[in-house]
Amino acid sequence: MSAISLKPARDQRVTVPALLRRKRGARPISMLTAYDFTFARIFDAAGIDVLLVGDSLGNVVQGMDTTLPVTLDEVVYHTRMVARAARRALVVADLPFGSYQVCEEDAVRSAVRCVKDGGAQAVKLEGGTAVSSAIARIVRAEIPVLGHVGLTPQAIHRMGGHRVQGRSEESARRVLEDARAVEAAGAFAVVLEGIPAQLAQSVTDALEIPTVGIGAGPGCDGQVLVMHDMLGFSDWTPSFVKQYASLGALAAQAARCFADDVANGKFPGEEHAYS
Ligand code: KIV
């Protein structure tokens, strides 16, 4: 594997129309979450198509049990860091719980903040038929929307936990209905989370817009993972995650070596001191 240069990517910028053309394309869409400048720069240079500033930051950055307490200010703050780093990737800000459910005006105002103050090029929001009017209203404000159906973590209390959706006939019908509603409302793509692979394939076949799966099998038009899971920073990784590195263990080892060196007077050496 060759080392990745952190020079700005020279490829053309990933745009919403370019992603739409990837439907049933030869090259599936790659999406990773990112929450800060450092990792966003690495992922962008590595050729990731979409950087999602997920409200999963509540879990992996803030250490909370759910995404529900994440605020719009926090999403905007993290989006700004990611947008500053992205030269090629499309930056999508995740609208947090409470920022779009009350009324359509709230939804548009929240999306506008993510674009104006955060530098996002699109927003994501969770839900299907229930939020389709909010999606349509944001799209009318010229802000591209990424939908998200199936297992929607902001609905954790309704679902009774992070449970796979669409297993029963009735639940599968609802997932398909939600995905169709999101498409009809004008979303440019939709995340399918935590649903059986066969259902994800059916939804992908039924829609004209690309689907991006997480825990939804190989039949989607793209895949997304939470960066902490795929890099091995999390204590526990769900079975649908492929862990591509063990950076948590590496960081712990480096910190232990540093602590030992300090304790044993091995750091700083003369070469690390000013003369
Ligand atoms: O918040 C998030 O990171 C997400 C992805 C898991 C799709 O919604």
Image: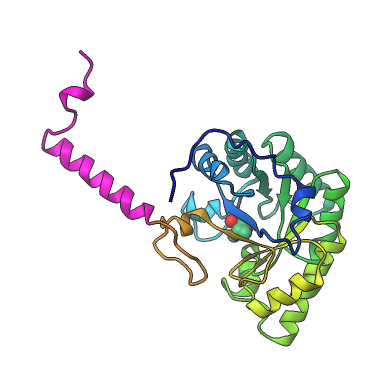
Q: Is residue 36 above or below residue 127?
A: above
Quadrant of ligand 1: it is: bottom right
Looking at the image, the residue that sits furthest to the top is: 275
Would you identify the image quadrant in which residue 82 lies? Answer: top right
- Residue 271 locus on image (x, y percent): 20, 23
- Residue 178 locus on image (x, y percent): 78, 70
Q: Is residue 261 above or below residue 222?
A: above
Q: Which residue: 75% across, 84% down?
A: 170
Q: Is residue 264 magenta?
A: yes
Would you identify the image quadrant in which residue 98 lies? Answer: bottom right
The stretch of residues the image draws in magenta is 246-275
Residue 69 visible in the current orientation: no
Residue 157 visible in the current orientation: yes
Between 30 and 126, the one nearer to me in the picture? 30
Please indicate whether residue 215 sits to the left or right of residue 265 in the image. Answer: right
Q: Is residue 39 magenta?
A: no
